[in-house]
Image (spheres, rainbow, N blue to C red):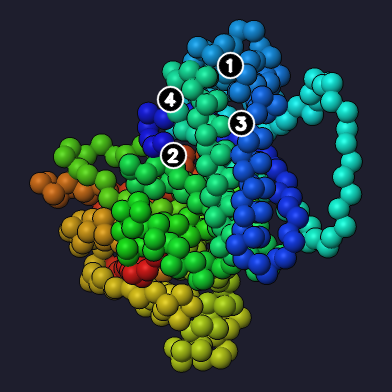
Amino acid sequence: MVYSEECAIIFRLKGILELACQLDNPNAGSQSQSTISKSFQGLRSKVSSKNIVFTVCNSPILIWPNTGFRSSMESLTEASACGDILQYIESDDGGSKKTLKKKAKKRSGHTVVNLKLLFEVTDPAGNEAPSLIRVDTQLHSVKMPLHLDCVLPVTTDESLASVCTGMVETLRKQLAEMEEVVQRYRKGSSFLVPQPFHFQLPEPAGLTTVIYPAGVPDSQLQAIREDLHRKFELPSDRPYLRRANAFHFPDAAYKDGYLRNPHIHLNPPNIEDAKLYLVQGVYIYHHYMQDRVDDDGWGCAYRSLQTICSWFQQQGYVETAVPTHTQIQQALVDVGDKEPRFVGSRQWIGSIEVQVVLNQLLGVTSKILFVSQGSELATKGRELANHFQIEGTPVMIGGGVLAHTILGVAWSENSGQIRFLILDPHYTGGEDLQTITDKGWCGWKGPEFWDQNAYYNLCLPQRPKTI
């Protein structure tokens, strides 16, 4: 199912099923493989049974998808549009049950409807008497929780019946894919837990789920990703399917407290015939006074560098943490660019040092664009447009005593008019999105923003060619 602008609702179903099987001889490959397959087949039959129940989170709604569609709300029938379900869901901020539906109408983007997987535990009593069979043999008992996480993007007018049918099919498919992972990585009676990850791929693939084995690092899954890139016809020069690339659901908060991509909340500038050339992917806004470091007045280039490092981390190119000021300084000492006393100081760094650190800590190369005075930046639209179109990385610009991060340009090839999308590291406040966008700490700036007489160096990081 393609997740696009037309798919206004993402149904997300989460639940736990227990895989249990008895292995006569874990080292007997074909026999154990057959036993595991039978256990998974039992789970697929379970999700196809009449006992399965979907409960809609933050609502009183229960749905029995395999009984010809039955709901705890009489007003919801199999013919009801799935968007009708929103009026019964309480918002997480304590609003009324209709708040979510109103928000869905007001905002662009997508609404997530969270479901939980349940099963009825009682069945009608039969006439059969229980029987006991005693078997004397040594078996290896294996039990493992399977954390199911299924997604189904739909349009608001799709019927609830079709959503339920599609979700049951998605459940069965995910169990089959989990079986493949368990079988592939099993060693005797030792199993690796299969974990689902969701990725937003270019159309027509859309929102896609991939199962990876827990505990196996991305570096050891290269062959799996290569197969998936071929399957989905993805470019072979950038990562789409590393764990760091996993889709972030609109209703999920980031746990680290940092702001991501504040620029997406801005309106584009009004320039005739201009096209937007923007940073691709996700970055973290790093600025003065974060992380209990008082760098007001000297740390702007460090913060711009941290924002760039976060981009490479968030896109899955590196797994290392964003470097601290001290680690940045130590890297410059390690390559011989600075003296040892530089570590712990409050000395500035510039675009050249940013280039050196990116190469030293991340293995990332960069191009340097030099302009002799700020007034020349208005003529660099083509170079910057090409950079954001091809590389898509944030650009650090340093000139005079200030450093900023360029996230994109609005540029008219015909008239030459240009606006720069600036992320300002000099902000000293809290992570308040409205303040940051309203006060211009992240905003569109004209050529007059730059010191017209100062020289500038721009550090343009290049994407590594890898998946």
- Location of mark 1 (residue): 68
Distance between the alpha carbons at the discs numbered 3 and 4: 24 Å
Distance between the alpha carbons at the discs numbered 3 and 2: 43 Å
Q: Earlier in the sequence, mark 2 or mark 1?
A: 1
Residue placed most toward the observer, 127 or 208:
127
**Residue displayed at 67% across by 47% down:** 39
Mark 3 vs mark 4: in front: 3
- Could you tell me residue 421's position as x and y percent? 34, 50
Q: Earlier in the sequence, mark 3 or mark 1?
A: 3
- Location of mark 3 (residue): 48
Q: Residues within 10 Å of mark 1 (few under 14, many from 20)?
A: few
* Residue found farthest to the top: 75
Q: Under tag 3, what secondary structure? A: loop
Q: Under tag 1, what secondary structure? A: loop
- Location of mark 2 (residue): 265
Residue 391 visible in rendering: yes
Mark 3 vs mark 2: in front: 3
Residue placed most toward the observer, 436 or 57:
57
Distance between the alpha carbons at the discs numbered 4 and 1: 22 Å
